[in-house]
Image (cartoon, rainbow, N blue to C red):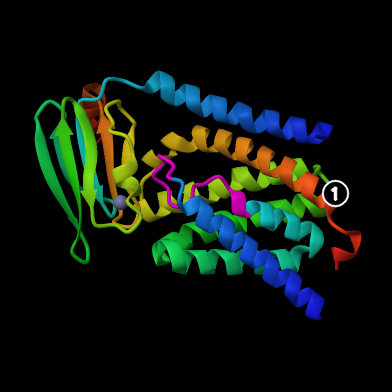
């Protein structure tokens, strides 16, 4: 139990730190939360270490923490839309064993952006924002791929008894 | 990467390419900017006239839109994230400036499209 708690705590803290780093990097796309997806590295690894439930808890905790600290209530809505959609599809692909860890990370990166842009279109009551859709898909592939490669490398080096 | 990963990546990049080409080829020289606040049209402004527009939104929020040299740009805003201010100035039809916190969207339209819109309305 204590070990489990400390793993959760460490993962949330790491994700929170990544979110902070990302908030320092401005990206010229007008959709709050569109970022490198560094924090998704933690969601990805949590999915492999803790399983679906644990990874989901850590992702929600990170979104709420970083939302209240760095960006405010309005942005949390978009982060949640992107986070939950991408999480659902990552968990599904992992369960069905459709893709490797890199493929699952790409799914995460792409659908994070898709979820956010859809939420933005709903809030603005305007679809003009889909102008950026192609760009966001490519951005999601690139970041998802990079995060996936890093994630794979880290996961291989983790002590096997870390998985619970 | 597995074979499935590559297939999936190919499909996503294909969709992105179709979207990108659609917008690339439908891009025209823009002629006016449409400002909407919370889904409602606030105003339409020619890109040929130099002017500054203060766009009010609820709770005393605002975005300052500047039209100069044929470009539209948000120079100042009350929103917490300032993403709208960081966006590059826009000129071509279909391009947008967006401020999600204030629910403000500035969209560039071209002349031809405006006459079509006129008929549709
Ligand atoms: Zn703004």
Please, is residue A94 above or below residue B11 in the view? below
User: Who's the residue at 35% across and 48% down the image?
Assistant: B83
What secondary structure characterizes most of the magenta part?
loop
Q: Nearer the viewer, residue B11 or B60?
A: B60
Residue A88: in sight, yes or no? no
User: Who's the residue at 32% across and 59% down the image?
Assistant: B80
- Relative side of A48 to B46, left or right: right
Image quarter hosting the N terminus of chain A: bottom right
- Relative side of A101 to B88, left or right: right
Instruction: Tell me the element at label 1.
Output: helix
Q: Quadrant of residue B70?
A: top left
Label 1 packing within 10 angstroms: few (<14), some (14-19), many (20+): few
Image quarter hosting the C terminus of chain A: bottom right
Q: Nearer the viewer, residue A147 or A88?
A: A147
Residue span colored magenta = A26-39
- Relative side of B52 to A31, left or right: left
Please, is residue B19 above or below residue B86 in the view? above
């Amino acid at each position: 139990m204590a070990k489990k708690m400390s793993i959760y705590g460490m993962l949330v803290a790491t994700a929170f730190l990544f979110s902070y780093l990302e908030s320092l990097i401005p990206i010229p796309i007008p959709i709050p939360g569109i970022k490198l997806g560094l924090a998704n590295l933690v969601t990805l690894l949590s999915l492999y270490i803790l399983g679906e439930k644990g990874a989901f808890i850590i992702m929600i905790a990170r979104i709420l923490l970083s939302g209240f600290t760095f960006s405010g209530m309005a942005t949390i809505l978009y982060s949640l839309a992107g986070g939950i959609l991408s999480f659902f599809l990552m968990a599904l692909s992992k369960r069905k064993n459709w893709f490797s860890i890199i493929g699952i990370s790409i799914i995460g990166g792409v659908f994070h952006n898709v979820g956010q842009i859809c939420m933005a279109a709903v809030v603005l009551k305007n679809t003009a924002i889909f102008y950026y859709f192609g760009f966001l898909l490519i951005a999601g592939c690139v970041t998802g791929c990079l995060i996936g490669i890093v994630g794979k490398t880290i996961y291989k080096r983790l002590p096997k008894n870390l998985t619970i | 990467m597995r074979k499935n990963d590559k297939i999936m990546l190919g499909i996503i990049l294909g969709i992105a390419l179709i979207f990108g080409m659609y917008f690339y080829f439908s891009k025209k020289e823009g002629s006016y900017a449409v400002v909407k606040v919370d889904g409602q049209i606030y105003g339409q402004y020619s890109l040929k006239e130099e002017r500054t527009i203060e766009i009010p939104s609820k709770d005393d929020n605002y975005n300052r839109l500047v039209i100069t040299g044929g470009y539209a740009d948000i120079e100042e805003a009350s929103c917490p994230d300032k993403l709208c201010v960081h966006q590059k100035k826009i000129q071509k039809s279909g391009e947008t400036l967006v401020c999600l916190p204030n629910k403000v969207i500035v969209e560039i339209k071209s002349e031809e499209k405006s006459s079509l819109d006129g008929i549709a309305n």
